[in-house]
């Protein structure tokens, strides 16, 4: 974890005990001497689980939360077979899939250290009003000067440039991010397909949401940049003859892509969201801006899972109908369908949602102070540890075609 973060040893022991593993040294949880499992070791997974997936939502500066989530998973001996993301989630996904196990956390830490490496406040006094002031100044500074290793303002405003000029469609240059990705991500490793990797983007001309998947194509830094090219801040990214923007414009989570796979693999899915669909009724115009962004970018997890469950039920009914038909009356196609439907995949989804702090406003997704980054990382780590402590939540459903969803902040304490 980040320097200065020291989770409680008792909570760590409880998680390790539930997973049937020896509790690591508390110092290792602070990133001091933590040792990831060897590359050849078999990661932990629940009974009957054939795939562990890590699904990462977009959310700019809030993405440090996902770094904390991954660290807690690695401490518990859990490594993903598939990493998928949108926007900042795509960048974190590339840092994970594009590094060996021993290098994943260092790569994540270095990325977040690098893009928050600007000291604005030496010390923030305790109290929401001071944190609000710090965050407001930090987000204003990001908008004015960009962030090191991430983006920088263009020399001329796009409003002053003629149509067709290469800089006329965005405010910032993301060349620093391309350089950072090429330094910290091994794209040859991603394309070796040891870990499945996919990122979502939207085609600027057609408006269609697409996934760049290493199962189908060669992944480069441009595919990651395309997934995070949020207009009008960042420029559209050209891949081949097409141009792409941030996938969050259409769908801010790649969960649907994973569930749509026709591979019948039982899956344990960790979905990490940075915006919560639930929230209080706004009381001020600032509250309206916050709530608007939450709703716009929050995942439609319940809608996606309900649709998937409904489809699974119809598939199972089709299977029940087919097994009642005598073998001699079935066509080859019907026999093939019957056999395929006899083993429908079962899915467990553990949803981890960042919970906005009282002093965070509508600019929290581009508030890149180091203090906030550390707070987000720690929150992700703690939420994941609490989730893993519920051993029953990790189990794969017993019923064919079943899907179960758990949300720490909704289900905790029940």
Image (cartoon, rainbow, N blue to C red):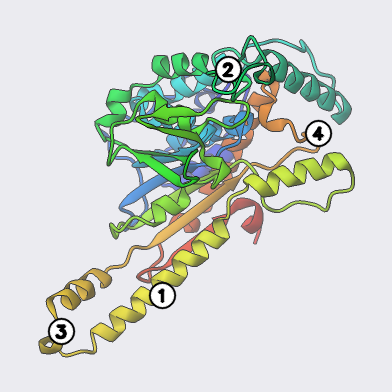
| Residue marked by disc 1 | 313
Q: Secondary structure at mark 4?
A: loop
Relative image position of residue 393 (x, y in whole percent): 49, 57
Residue drawn 67% across the image and 32% down it? 365
Which of the two marks, 4 or 1, is nearer to us in this view? 1
What separation in Å lies between label 2 and label 1 (alpha carbons)? 47 Å
Residue 332 image position (x, y, % from top left): 12, 76
How far apart marks 4 and 2 lie (CA) works out to 25 Å
As helix, strand or loop, the secondary structure at mark 3 comes to loop
Residue identified by numbered label 2: 151
The residue indicated by pointer 3 is: 330
Question: Tags 2 and 3 in contact by the CB under 8 Å rule?
Answer: no
Distance Cα–Cα, label 2 vs label 3? 60 Å
Is label 2 or label 1 in front? 2
First along the sequence among labels 1 and 3: 1
Q: In the rendered view of the protein, which quadrant contains the C terminus?
A: bottom right
Q: Earlier in the sequence, mark 3 or mark 4?
A: 3
Q: Nearer the viewer, mark 4 or mark 2?
A: 2
Q: Earlier in the sequence, mark 2 or mark 1?
A: 2
> According to the image, label 4 marks what residue?
359
In front: label 3 or label 4: 3
């Amino acid at each position: 974890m980040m320097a200065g973060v020291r989770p409680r040893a008792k909570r760590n022991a409880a998680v390790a005990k539930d997973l049937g593993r020896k509790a690591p040294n508390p110092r290792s949880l602070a990133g001091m001497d933590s040792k990831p499992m060897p590359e050849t070791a078999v990661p932990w997974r629940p009974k009957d689980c054939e795939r562990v997936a890590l699904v990462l939502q977009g959310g700019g500066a809030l993405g440090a939360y996902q770094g904390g989530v991954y660290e807690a998973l690695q401490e518990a001996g859990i490594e993903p077979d598939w990493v998928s993301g949108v926007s900042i989630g795509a960048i974190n996904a590339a840092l994970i899939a594009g590094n060996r196990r021993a290098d994943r956390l260092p790569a994540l830490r270095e990325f977040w250290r690098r893009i928050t490496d600007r000291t604005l406040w030496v010390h923030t006094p305790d109290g929401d009003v001071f944190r609000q002031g710090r965050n407001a100044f930090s987000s204003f500074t990001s908008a004015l000067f960009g962030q090191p290793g991430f983006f920088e303002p263009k020399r001329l405003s796009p409003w002053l440039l003629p149509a067709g000029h290469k800089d006329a469609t965005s405010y910032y240059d993301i060349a620093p991010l391309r350089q950072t990705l090429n330094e910290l991500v091994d794209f040859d490793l991603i394309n070796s397909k040891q870990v499945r990797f996919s990122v979502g983007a939207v085609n600027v001309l057609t408006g269609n949401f697409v996934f760049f998947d290493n199962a189908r194509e060669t992944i480069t830094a441009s595919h990651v940049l395309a997934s995070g090219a949020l207009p009008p801040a960042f420029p559209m990214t050209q891949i081949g003859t097409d141009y792409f923007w941030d996938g969050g414009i259409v769908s801010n989570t790649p969960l649907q892509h994973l569930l749509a796979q026709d591979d019948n693999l039982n899956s344990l899915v960790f979905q990490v969201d940075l915006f919560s669909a639930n929230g209080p009724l706004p009381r001020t115009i600032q509250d309206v801006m916050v709530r608007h962004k939450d709703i716009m970018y929050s995942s439609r997890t319940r809608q996606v899972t309900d649709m998937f469950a409904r489809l699974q039920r119809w598939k199972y009914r089709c299977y029940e109908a087919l097994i009642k038909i005598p073998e001699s009356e079935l066509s080859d196609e019907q026999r093939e369908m019957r056999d395929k439907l006899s083993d429908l995949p079962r899915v467990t989804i553990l949803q981890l949602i960042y919970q906005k702090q009282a002093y965070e406003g509508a600019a929290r997704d581009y508030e890149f102070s180091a203090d906030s980054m550390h707070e987000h990382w720690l929150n992700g780590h703690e939420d994941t540890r609490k989730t893993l402590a519920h051993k029953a939540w990790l189990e794969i459903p017993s019923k064919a075609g079943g899907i179960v969803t758990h949300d720490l902040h909704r289900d905790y304490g029940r």
